[in-house]
Amino acid sequence: MTEDTISFNEIKAIFPDDEWDVGVLSAENFKRACLAPIKYKFHPILPDYTNDIHFNGIMNAIVLIKTGHSWDYTHYEEADAILRENGMDDAFLCYTNYKEAAVLSGLGVRARNSLVYSYKFGFDCHITAACFHRTIIDLPTNKRINYKLWPHCTNCYDCVNACPVQAIKGREEPYWLDSEACDDFIGNSDHPTIPSVKKYWHKHVYPHLTKEEADEIAGKGFMPWDRNGFTYDGQVVRKNGEPVDVPVCRECTSQPRCSKWGGKFPYEQF
């Protein structure tokens, strides 16, 4: 190695293998991921390269997938801390189309439910990426880049049939997700058995409100997380400073056939 290069094996070694999967993107593929459309810019605290016509793709990047689910987005902080603690101060996390990045790095494949199935952790995982100005060498030779639908989705419509709001339009190409219907159900559903953000928030943060009052606040799109030890910084919900999981609908990832292939991580009782 020279001062202008860094080994992929050195990067991969600093991330605990039981919690992380690590891939790599060339500058060309990183640019390709950055120019792919995204559903919604939910985490704008990172440098944002999505759909940036001025981004010239000079950097290569690693892609990081961490086991986890729901609203626990502490993987951003954890990934950054691991890089800093190991002297990789020239690396920085970035915002891009993480699904596209996961596929291009060979860490996962698209499924009919519109999510990426991580080869290592199934559906319940979080993705981020980190840019490097140094050239990454010793690249993995076993990358599985698969642009087709996950083979186990062939002739399977379990997630389509299970979606409580029929948001998955996956019976014929082009596959797409009605993200408005999905997000509204995740946030504001009153389903008797499937959890939602509103139900968790009402039960644990603002239990003194009547259902009608809670519905009115949630319907305005902002639920205050400022009581009973709760906080929310736009990334992570915390209780007394510790991250907590907020159970929400994951019916599309917990079907029996997905379970057969390691894709079932059902939400805990809330």
Image (cartoon, rainbow, N blue to C red):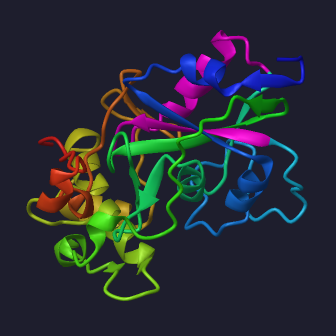
Q: Give whichever of 24, 195 is nearer the camera.
A: 24
* Residue 66 as seen in the image, left or right of residue 47: left
Which quarter shows the C terminus? top left
Q: Give whichever of 187, 151 is nearer the camera.
A: 151
Q: Is residue 221 magenta?
A: no
The image quadrant that residue 81 belongs to is top right
Task: Mark yes or no: residue 49 visible.
Answer: no
Identify the magenta region.
60-89
Task: Mark yes or no: residue 125 visible.
Answer: yes
Instruction: Measuring from the top left, give residue 37's x and y in whole percent.
Output: 64, 69
Question: Residue placed at 40% from the left, 37% from the top?
Answer: 72
Residue most extreme to the front: 141
Question: Residue placed at 23% from the left, 79% from the top?
Answer: 155
Instruction: Measuring from the top left, give residue 114's x and y in whole percent.
Output: 41, 68
Instruction: Measuring from the top left, give residue 198's x and y in whole percent.
Output: 29, 56
Question: Residue placed at 25% from the left, 64% from the top?
Answer: 252
* Residue 187 as seen in the image, left or right of residue 1: left
